[in-house]
Image: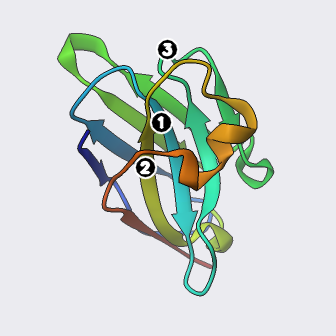
Amino acid sequence: VQLQASGGGLVQAGDSLRLSCAASQRNYNMGWFRQAPGKEREFVAAITWSGSTTDYRDSVKGRFTISRDNANGKNMVHLQMNSLKPEDTALYYCGAKGGINFSGWRARLDHEYEYWGQGTQVTVSS
């Protein structure tokens, strides 16, 4: 599975961005992770292959929304990020994991994912 992340940029605090991840195949569970300089990669959000279940880290709940768009042959996952804060600054990666019943604590672990995109930089200035 090939993943292509896009949508990052330089914005001011309070602004919004929408990240997108295009997958070459359908029906994969998807997750967004981020890594700030000098820090470990951390979980941001996840969505199951069906779109029925989503999960977020506490610091982005109410601000970020993960969704998927499989209409018309598209295999896209989006991360709508509102009310951005300087602490959201990081390189954002999308990951994919096959199988059913992949949610909960497992979906929060980056080593559980099988495929990764190249990352897209999000920089939020204060």
The residue at which mark 1 appears reads as: 30
Mark toward the start of the polypeptide (1 vs 3): 1
Query: Which amino acid type is shown beneath numbered disc 3?
Result: Ser
The residue at which mark 3 appears reads as: 50
Q: Position of residue 12 (x, y in %)?
A: 53, 70
Mark toward the start of the polypeptide (1 vs 2): 1
Q: Residues within 10 Å of mark 1 (few under 14, many from 20)?
A: many
- Mark number displayed over residue 94: 2
The reply to whether discs 1 and 2 touch (Cβ–Cβ < 8 Å) is yes
Label 3 to label 2: alpha-carbon separation: 17 Å
Q: Position of residue 102 (x, y in %)?
A: 60, 27
Q: Residue furthest right?
A: 58
Q: Residues within 10 Å of mark 2 (few under 14, many from 20)?
A: many
Q: Is residue 94 left or right of residue 15?
A: left
- In which image quadrant can residue 53 be found? top right
- SS label for mark 3: loop
Q: Position of residue 124 (x, y in %)?
A: 54, 72
Label 1 to label 3: alpha-carbon separation: 10 Å
Nearer the observer, 106 or 36: 106
Q: Residue at x 54, y 63 (%)?
A: 34
Q: Residue at x 64, y 50 (%)?
A: 109
Picture layout, residue 125 above or below residue 99: below
Residue 77 seen anywhere in this rendered image of the structure: yes
Q: Residue at x 38, y 20 (%)?
A: 27
- SS label for mark 2: strand
Q: Residues within 10 Å of mark 3 (few under 14, many from 20)?
A: few
Mark toward the start of the polypeptide (3 vs 2): 3
The reply to whether discs 1 and 3 touch (Cβ–Cβ < 8 Å) is no
Query: Which amino acid type is shown beneath numbered disc 1?
Result: Met
- In which image quadrant can residue 1 be found? top left
